[in-house]
Amino acid sequence: VDVVTGVEVVPKVGKEVFLTVTLKNTDIVERGMAAIVVVRDPAGVAVARFAAMVTLGAGASTDVAFGWTPIVSGRHTVEVYIVRSLADRTPMGDPATFTVSVGA
């Protein structure tokens, strides 16, 4: 969805799109965390990986965006993992998964 117009964006092969992940600290104290995003093509092959570290106050949230240029059309799977840090991959919650349909 285009953040300015609210219109659904259909990604196209060779055109950059941004994947946005909203992170929220549901704890009562400040927490640091890492978001790791893996994009898999229609065959299940990992074609992109992104990571970002954030520190959020109690109850705070933020959006993290990653630019991605699809190279094949079809239904891609996006996996989001929230871990303690890039060095400590202890999960801080269940992974989230969604799909992105890429046009030719």
Image (tube, grey):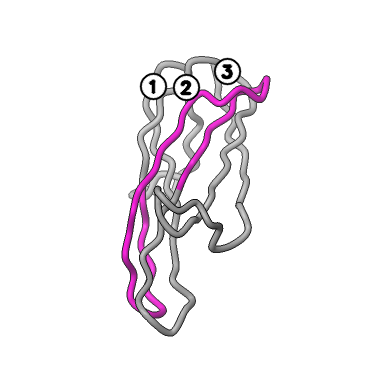
Q: Residue shown at 54%/63% (left/top)?
A: 92
Q: Three-letter amino acid code at disc 1? A: Lys
SS state under label 1 = loop
Label 3 – label 1 distance at C-alpha = 11 Å
Q: Cβ–Cβ below 8 Å for labels 1 and 2?
A: yes
From the image, tell me which residue sits under label 1.
Answer: 15
> Mark 1 or 2 closer to N-term?
1
Q: Cβ–Cβ below 8 Å for labels 2 and 3?
A: yes
Tell me the tag on residue 23: none
Tell me the tag on residue 73: 3
Q: Position of residue 88 (x, y in %)?
A: 45, 53
Tell me the tag on residue 70: 2
Q: Find the magenta span and give its range.
A: 36-64
SS state under label 2 = loop
> For this view, does 12 lie left or right of residue 16?
right
Q: Position of residue 94 (x, y in %)?
A: 63, 58
SS state under label 3 = loop
Q: Three-letter amino acid code at disc 3? A: Ser
